[in-house]
């Protein structure tokens, strides 16, 4: 088991949101990287290997749910858990999560919720990997 | 394209009669001779209306009607049931499971055509209404989203500020964000008011210069923050026809853009000029300028210039400027230089002229 700080990559077109996400998540003991554009994300994910990506949905040049689809379609990046992070209507977020088989969403605005859910998604991903391996071994 | 009527009738002569007369009346037609055919034609042909006989081989008319009403695609498609004469029971049952009207055999051709036309008109009207409503809803939800975004920033900085003793710079950002929210809200409420066709404000005569100076004063801090200098020239003593609140909002929106899209250390020039029959108010920035094809679209609702994504904006500011200017009988235009700099000019009627005619906002 790796023992480094969990690394979170936050993608948003709004500098204020990035600043706040960095502020709050750094306090939780995570290493936070931010990126203020939807472009170059698949390359960035390969370069920094984050444990979790928080992705804004409402970016004008490339909507986050389309970007999520790209990330999930690329086999070099599809293993990284993607969580939508947006003030968009929650119904929309839920359906985007299902449609692109993402890991979940967090509604912007509630800092306590952000902290709690980021912890949850990181934890869950570890569990998923373990259970995936188990089922693999069982088949073998 | 002409409307498509699906005729579901197993008696070939009746089907032919209906088909001939409907085609003569200008409709496109397709005929199905049993219930299964009817459902598959219905599904792929998307008819605008269905004439549906009850007694059919395979699935009967009841079943077809029930299935159509259960599917999302055809739940609103008008259905006219064809029943035997005096079969009140059948008619009631048909209306109960979702048919819109019925025809009793034997029917006259005129009756068929009248009922078809009436139902199609009503269904078109309903569809137009639905489209209109869903557009309105998506626009509202867009604005709501924008506001929620702001609120979450306010919440975040407020939290940070309250945890620190030297929270001053955070508190400043809170107030900037609040101001922006305030502007969106004013724009949105003006937009709703003017688009709903509310009567324009009564026009008054006032000194344009005074209103401009007042608005500039409110902007000075924001401008200083961004290193932009505001200049006002000319026009002392110019009186115009208008309404102060509307003019204040027009100037606010133009100044807000001129500051936002300016270069750092740039200037904003506000000028009042007497020109021909009227008085021009112009706001010029030293930003990158606007390309000709974008200039034509810049007053459209929700239009934002490509490349301006990094600047916060709701896309309704200039649209509101246009609506407001027209509501007080003025005109607004934009000019831009290739070398950079954009000038918005609002033309007012001079106060000593007759009251200007108001163009409708719609």
Image: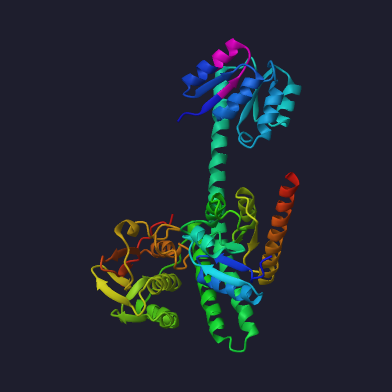
Q: Is residue B249 visible?
A: yes
| Vertical position of residue B57 compared to residue B271: above or below | above
Q: Position of residue A97 (x, y in %)?
A: 63, 53
| Vertical position of residue A25 compared to residue B37: above or below | below
Q: State which region is magenta.
A: B6-18
Q: Is residue B214 visible?
A: no
Residue B319 location, quadrant: bottom left
Q: Position of residue A129 (x, y in %)?
A: 69, 56
| Vertical position of residue A63 compared to residue B279: above or below | above
Q: Quadrant of the N terminus of chain B?
A: top left
Q: Which residue occupies the foreground of this view, A108 or B251? A: A108
**Residue drawn at (53%, 72%) of the image:** A16
Q: Is residue B115 magenta?
A: no
Q: Position of residue B129 (x, y in %)?
A: 55, 44
Q: Which residue occupies the foreground of this view, B32 or A12? A: A12
- For the view shown, which residue lies furthest in the left direction? B276
- For the view shown, which residue lies furthest in the bottom direction? B165
């Amino acid at each position: 088991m790796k023992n480094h700080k969990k690394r979170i990559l936050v993608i948003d077109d709004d500098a204020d949101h990035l600043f706040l996400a960095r502020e709050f998540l750094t306090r939780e003991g995570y290493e936070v990287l931010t990126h203020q554009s939807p472009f170059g994300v698949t390359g960035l994910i390969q370069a920094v290997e984050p444990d979790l990506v928080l992705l804004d949905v409402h970016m004008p040049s490339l909507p986050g749910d389309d970007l999520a689809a790209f990330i999930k379609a690329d086999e070099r990046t599809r293993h990284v858990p993607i969580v939508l992070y947006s003030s968009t209507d929650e119904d929309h977020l839920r359906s985007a999560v299902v449609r692109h088989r993402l890991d979940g969403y967090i509604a912007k605005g509630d800092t306590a919720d952000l902290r709690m859910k980021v912890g949850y998604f990181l934890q869950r991903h570890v569990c998923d990997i373990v259970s995936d391996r188990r089922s693999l071994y069982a088949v073998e | 394209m002409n409307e498509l009527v699906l005729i579901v009738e197993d008696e070939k002569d009746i089907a032919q009669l209906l088909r001939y007369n409907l085609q003569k009346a200008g409709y496109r037609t397709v005929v199905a001779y049993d219930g299964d055919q009817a459902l598959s034609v219905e599904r792929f042909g998307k008819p605008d209306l269905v004439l549906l006989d009850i007694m059919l081989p395979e699935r009967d008319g009841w079943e077809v009607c029930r299935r159509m009403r259960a599917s999302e695609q055809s739940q609103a498609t008008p259905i006219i049931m064809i029943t035997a004469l005096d079969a009140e029971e059948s008619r009631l049952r048909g209306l109960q499971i979702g048919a819109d009207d019925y025809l009793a055999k034997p029917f006259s051709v005129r009756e068929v055509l009248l009922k078809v036309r009436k139902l199609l008109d009503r269904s078109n009207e309903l569809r137009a209404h639905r489209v209109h409503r869903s557009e309105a809803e998506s626009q509202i939800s867009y604005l709501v989203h924008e506001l929620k975004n702001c609120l979450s920033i306010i919440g975040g900085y407020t939290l940070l500020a309250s945890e620190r003793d030297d929270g001053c710079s955070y508190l400043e950002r809170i107030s900037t964000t609040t101001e922006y929210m305030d502007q969106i809200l004013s724009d949105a409420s003006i937009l709703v008011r003017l688009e709903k066709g509310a009567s324009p404000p009564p026009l008054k005569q006032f000194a344009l210069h005074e209103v401009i100076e007042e608005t500039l004063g409110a902007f000075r801090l924001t401008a200083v923050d961004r290193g932009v200098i505001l200049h006002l020239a000319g026009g002392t003593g110019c009186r115009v026809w208008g309404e102060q609140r509307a003019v204040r909002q027009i100037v606010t929106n133009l100044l807000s853009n001129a500051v936002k899209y300016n270069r750092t250390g740039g200037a904003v020039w506000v000028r009042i000029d007497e020109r021909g029959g009227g008085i021009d108010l112009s706001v010029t920035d030293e930003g990158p300028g606007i390309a000709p094809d974008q200039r034509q679209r810049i007053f459209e609702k929700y239009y934002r210039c490509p490349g301006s994504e990094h600047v916060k904006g709701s896309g309704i500011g200039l649209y509101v400027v246009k609506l407001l200017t027209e509501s007080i009988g003025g005109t607004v235009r934009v000019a831009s230089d290739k070398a950079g700099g954009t000038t918005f000019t609002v033309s007012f009627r001079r106060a000593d002229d007759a009251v200007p005619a108001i163009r409708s906002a719609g």
